[in-house]
Image: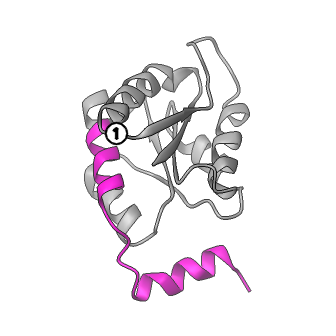
Amino acid sequence: MQIAIASDHAGYRLKCFLSAHLSERGYTMVDFGTDSEEPVDYPDFIRPAAESIAFDECIRGIALGGSGNGEAMVANRIKGVRCAVCWNEESARLASAHNHANMISIGARLVEQEKAAAIIDVWLDTEFDAGRHARRISKIDNPQ
């Protein structure tokens, strides 16, 4: 499974850590940058990662920044992307099970590396519950 990953300067170290963690789990990582801790504008990196999901180039995506909020806002502007800001395993589980989140955003200044890895693992390992949630996801993706 190909997973898009992108960060701004605040999320760079976490991006490197998570990329290695997920590669060890057998995932193929597609890195959209940034490549250092030099200040950058997060939309320049998050948007292409989100577009890779919308265009079916990557199956899921990870956005990383200081708080994760701005990154999620950028990702959610792309049609077909459902990006959830997650801060613990339960928020990640619900993002997958109820919201069918195909992208996750984590605040690198708020969540420690090991905790972020646990959040990502839960998100990837949790299946969508469908049922009543499928109707709601359809309304997100196809508003009337």
Q: Nearer the viewer, residue 102 or 30?
A: 30
- Is residue 119 part of the magenta span, yes or no? yes
Q: Which residue is at a point 46% across and 67% down the rendered structure image?
A: 100
Q: Amino acid type of disc 1?
A: Gly
Q: Residue 89 at what x, y percent from top left?
A: 27, 51
Q: Mark 1 points at which residue?
A: 26
Colouring convention used in this rendered image of the protein: one colour
Where residue 38 sits in the image (x, y, percent)? Answer: 62, 11
Q: In this view, does 79 lie to the left or right of 97?
A: right
The answer to which quarter of the image holds residue 128 is bottom left
Residue drawn at point x = 64 percent, y = 56 percent:
56
Q: In which quarter of the image is residue 141?
A: bottom right
Give the residue displayed 70% in from the left and 81% down from the top. 143
Indicate whether 136 appears above or below 51. below
Secondary structure mostly seen in magenta is helix
Image quadrant for the C terminus? bottom right
Query: Dot 1, crowdedness within 10 Å: few (<14), some or many (≥20)?
Result: few
Q: In screen coordinates, is 131 left or right of 4?
A: left
Residue situated in front as seen by the camera: 66 or 131: 131
Identify the magenta region: 117-144
Residue 57 horizontal/vertical position (percent): 63, 50
